[in-house]
Image (tube, rainbow, N blue to C red):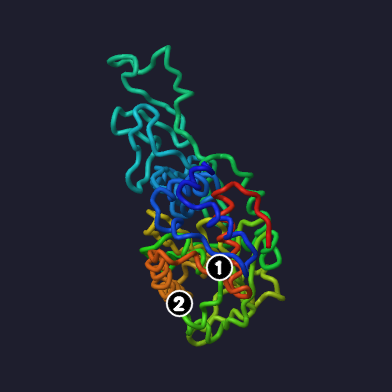
């Protein structure tokens, strides 16, 4: 697979990405424009790494099920009878028919429309009509216990459904530990259990005509704030931001020491009860590689996860959560939820034209991946290095 990447991209173009920031270039154009490259990226990043494919609260009840397509890989998200989220490959073990085409709620089994083979919510094959002939539903030469649905390794964290398709990554607990350790200085495990998805003003979708990586690159840095987000920069200035670069290299982003939301009448949401008093005006915005961007604040949390459709088209899903049922669903806070929703929708929409413009710019044959500010682009460089080293299986080392 490494040799495959070098058939598409000159090795020197990837090696220079991991140089020290003052000498490095960004990822080359092929990483954003080439469909053959995308096939390699799917394997090396979206199959081999922990990847977000949705949120657990989108299937709230037992038997709720929804399909998901991960760059061509058909998957099923289901809540089983023990209230556990499970992920299966969305394919019948008989003749390979796709089982689920739209979100629905089932009572007992997933039934294949082709020959009516059926599976329970744990993926076991439970019915094989006429397998051994008319009205003969069993056969001594066929073992149903070996022909269930193929389950995907998964975990749920802060409502995010994470999967590792290849089953070759470290445990998710180990994978996420560096970020959890960092954020233990902000909020507690009990705080995290309080996050609640709203019944209104809690979700929006943006469709970006660009490669998914541009959204991560843009999110990682605050350099663009005064130019792209003048409204935000008016009260959360670029000077108030600091860099975040996770070691080992699984996340990067930015934080601010001046989180002071401006709602009408100076109204406020309830805060996480365990939020650090020393961090009350801090907020952090971290891209957990490859495809989820997370914001934590004293009064709400959001997850902005990416669904790559092709090398030049991405769906961006924004999920916003509050502290407890009343803040998330009560009428008292409905106006505040609307204001917060509109604020984040406006900010992310401002970024949309920027990342789409970068996609268009990458069509220039003279662009070499660009340069980095040695002071303000460190987290973005960090992400570029992560992609380059993931593609080539090199060990990551900091510069």
Label 2 crowding class (10 Å Cα cut-off): few <14, some 14-19, many 20+?
some
Label 1 crowding class (10 Å Cα cut-off): few <14, some 14-19, many 20+?
many
Q: Is residue 148 visible?
A: yes
Quadrant in which the C terminus is drawn:
bottom right
Task: Name the residue: 48% across, 64% down.
Answer: 368
Task: Name the residue: 46% across, 56% down.
Answer: 31
Q: Nearer the viewer, residue 332 or 229?
A: 229
Residue at the top extreme, as displayed: 140
User: Where is mark 1, residue-wise?
Assistant: 220
Disc 2 to disc 1: CB gap under 8 Å: no
Q: Is residue 205 visible?
A: no
**Mark 2, secondary structure of its residue:** helix
Q: Nearer the viewer, residue 95 or 139?
A: 95
Q: Earlier in the sequence, mark 2 or mark 1?
A: 1
Q: Quadrant of residue 192?
A: bottom right
Report x, y in % for residue 55.
48, 54
**Disc ID at residue 343:** 2
**Mark 1, secondary structure of its residue:** helix
Residue 310 position (above or below residue 286): above
Task: Name the residue: 55% across, 77% down.
Answer: 223
């Amino acid at each position: 697979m490494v040799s495959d990447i070098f058939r598409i991209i000159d090795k020197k173009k990837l090696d220079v990405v991991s140089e020290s920031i003052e000498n490095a270039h960004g990822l080359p154009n092929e990483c954003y424009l080439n469909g053959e490259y995308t096939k390699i990226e799917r394997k090396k990043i979206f199959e081999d790494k922990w990847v977000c494919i949705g949120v657990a609260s989108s299937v709230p009840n037992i038997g709720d099920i929804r399909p998901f397509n991960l760059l061509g890989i058909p998957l099923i998200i289901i809540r089983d009878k023990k209230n556990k989220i499970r992920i299966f490959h969305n394919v019948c073990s008989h003749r390979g028919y796709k089982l689920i085409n739209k979100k629905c709620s089932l009572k007992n089994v997933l039934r294949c429309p082709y020959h009516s083979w059926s599976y329970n919510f744990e993926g076991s094959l439970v019915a094989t009509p006429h397998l051994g002939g008319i009205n003969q539903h069993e056969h001594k030469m066929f073992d149903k216990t070996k022909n269930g649905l193929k389950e995907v390794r998964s975990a749920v964290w802060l409502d995010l459904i994470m999967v590792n398709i290849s089953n070759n990554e470290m445990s998710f607990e180990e994978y996420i530990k560096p970020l959890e350790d960092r954020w233990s200085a902000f909020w507690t495990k009990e705080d995290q259990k309080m996050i609640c998805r709203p019944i209104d003003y809690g979700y929006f979708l943006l469709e970006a005509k660009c490669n998914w990586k541009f959204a991560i690159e843009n999110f990682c840095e605050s350099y663009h704030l005064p130019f792209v987000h003048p409204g935000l920069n008016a009260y959360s200035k670029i000077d108030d931001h600091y860099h975040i670069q996770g070691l080992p290299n699984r996340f990067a982003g930015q934080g601010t020491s001046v989180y002071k939301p401006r709602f009408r009448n100076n109204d406020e949401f309830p805060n996480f009860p365990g939020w650090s008093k020393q961090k009350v005006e801090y907020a952090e915005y971290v891209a957990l590689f490859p495809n989820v961007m997370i914001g934590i604040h004293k009064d709400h949390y959001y997850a902005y996860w990416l669904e790559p459709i092709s090398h030049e088209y991405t769906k961006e899903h924004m999920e916003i959560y509050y502290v407890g049922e009343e803040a998330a669903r009560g009428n008292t806070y409905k106006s505040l939820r609307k204001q917060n929703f509109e604020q984040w929708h406006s900010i992310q929409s401002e970024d949309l034209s920027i990342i789409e413009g970068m996609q268009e710019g990458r069509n220039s044959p003279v662009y070499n991946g660009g340069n980095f500010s040695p002071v303000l682009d460190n987290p973005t460089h960090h992400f570029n290095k992560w992609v380059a080293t993931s593609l080539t299986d090199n060990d990551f080392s900091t510069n």
